Image (cartoon, rainbow, N blue to C red):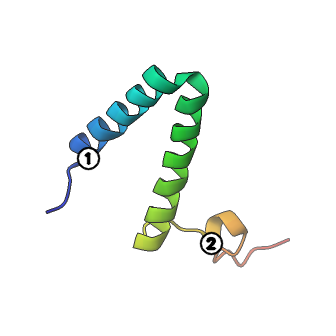
Amino acid sequence: MPVSNTVLGLIVGLVLGVSAAFGGFVAFLIVLVLGALGLLIGRALDGQLDLDGLTGRGRSSSRL
């Protein structure tokens, strides 16, 4: 059963809140950065992230 974006957002918010409450600001930033990295890796594995645009290997044929 897929998780809705609302539930996923709630879970992420709760995890960030708990990390900020018990670990302080540095722990909050670490969890935030690792969460964003996990999101990018997950989207790339699902094929929903176009990495060709980031690496400069796009389909553009008008290179100068």
| Comparing labels 1 and 2, the label whose residue is closer to the camera | 1
Which residue is located at x 19 percent, y 60 percent? Answer: 2
**Please, is residue 18 above or below residue 46 in the view?**
above
Query: In the picture provided, is 38 more to the left or to the right than 2?
Result: right
Task: Identify which residue is drawn at 45% across, 30% down.
Answer: 19
Residue at the spot of label 1: 5
Q: Which is nearer the N-term, disc 1 or disc 2? A: 1
| 12 vs 6, nearest the viewer | 12
Residue 13, numbered circle: none
Label 1 neighbourhood size at 10 Å, few (<14), some (14-19), many (20+)?
A: few
The alpha-carbon separation of the residues under discs 1 and 2 comes to: 26 Å
Three-letter amino acid code at the position of disc 2: Asp
Query: Disc 2 designates what residue?
Result: 52
Q: Secondary structure at mark 1?
A: helix
Of the 4 image quadrants, the one containing the C terminus is bottom right
Horizontal side of 13 relative to 5 (left or right) equals right
Residue 7 is at least partly visible in this image: yes
Q: Is residue 47 visible?
A: no
Closer-to-camera residue (23/57): 23
Report the residue at 57% width, 23% height from top. Answer: 25
Q: Can you say whether 38 is above or below 18 in the image?
A: below
